[in-house]
Amino acid sequence: MTTIGQRRSGTSRQRLLWLLCICDAALLVASGLFHLHLWDIAYRNVPTLRYLFLVQVAATLLFAVALLVLRRLIVVLASLALMVGTIAGFIMARTVGIFGFKDPSSTTLAIEVLVVELAAIVALATTAWLIRGRTRPVLAMPGRSSADRPFRQIGLPSRAEGGTSLGQQLVDLPCDRVLDLVG
């Protein structure tokens, strides 16, 4: 039985998740727009990098929309990987070079993009942590194996009960449902 306090807590967590998803999406869009501007003013004539900048723009916009529409952990993690990879590319271009291109100078705009991407990493990691949440241990039940425990713990049917793999079920769960289950 759910108490009013538990419902309010779940609702506030869902609002927080929604707010974080909006912030995540805004930071992804900002990174994409910065990269589009950088491509336009400087990198459109650099072989290979001109395409990578456009791929980054498209990916950030796609992930921003997917985050708002789907709100799934897998999208948050993919967005996080994109931002980490973007910063890794920036660092490589400034130090050892990337695809034959090395630019040791840093403009104010490049530093601003780096700050936005670092903020996106923090926000996305926070969102992923909130979605994943903490799970409560489940006591073993008579007649069921311990292999079914992860399924029962979050209210999903086990494989023996006709369910799909736990990983697939978790990927398919909307973020707000995950919050309800772990809260």
Image (cartoon, helix red, strand yellow):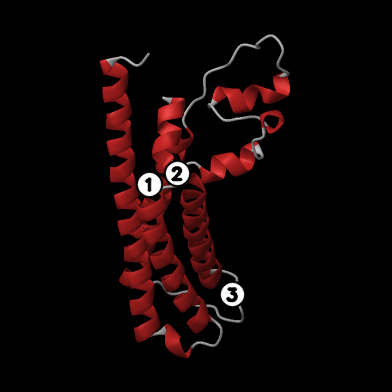
Question: Pointer 3: residues within 10 angstroms few (<14), some, or many (20+)?
Answer: some
- Residue 18: horizontal and vertical position, in percent? 31, 43
- Residue 68: horizontal and vertical position, in percent? 35, 53
Going by the numbered disc 2, the residue's amino acid type is Ala
Observer-nearest of 49 and 56? 56
What secondary structure is found at the residue carrying circle 2? helix
Residue hosting label 1: 123
What secondary structure is found at the residue carrying circle 3? loop
Query: Pointers 2 and 3 in contact (CB under 8 A)?
Result: no
Query: Pointers 1 and 2 in contact (CB under 8 A)?
Result: yes
**Which label sits on residue 69?**
none
Going by the numbered disc 3, the residue's amino acid type is Ile
As displayed, is residue 100 above or below residue 65? below
What secondary structure is found at the residue carrying circle 1? helix
Residue hosting label 2: 125
Please give the name of the residue rendered at 32% of the width and 19% of the height, measured from the top-left corner. Answer: 6
Please give the name of the residue rendered at 33% of the width and 78% of the height, measured from the top-left corner. Answer: 37
Residue hosting label 3: 98
Question: Pointer 1: residues within 10 angstroms few (<14), some, or many (20+)?
Answer: many
Observer-nearest of 42 and 181? 181
Count how many numbered circles sit on residues in the image: 3
- Residue 49: horizontal and vertical position, in percent? 52, 80
Give the spatial CA distance, label 1 vs label 2. 5 Å
Please give the name of the residue rendered at 65% of the width and 11% of the height, measured from the top-left corner. Answer: 141
Question: Pointer 2: residues within 10 angstroms few (<14), some, or many (20+)?
Answer: some
Going by the numbered disc 1, the residue's amino acid type is Ala
Which-is-in-front pick, marks 1 and 3?
Answer: 1
Observer-nearest of 68 and 91? 68
Q: Is residue 107 visible?
A: no
Snapshot quadrant of residue 147: top right
Sooner in the amino-acid sequence: mark 1 or mark 3:
3
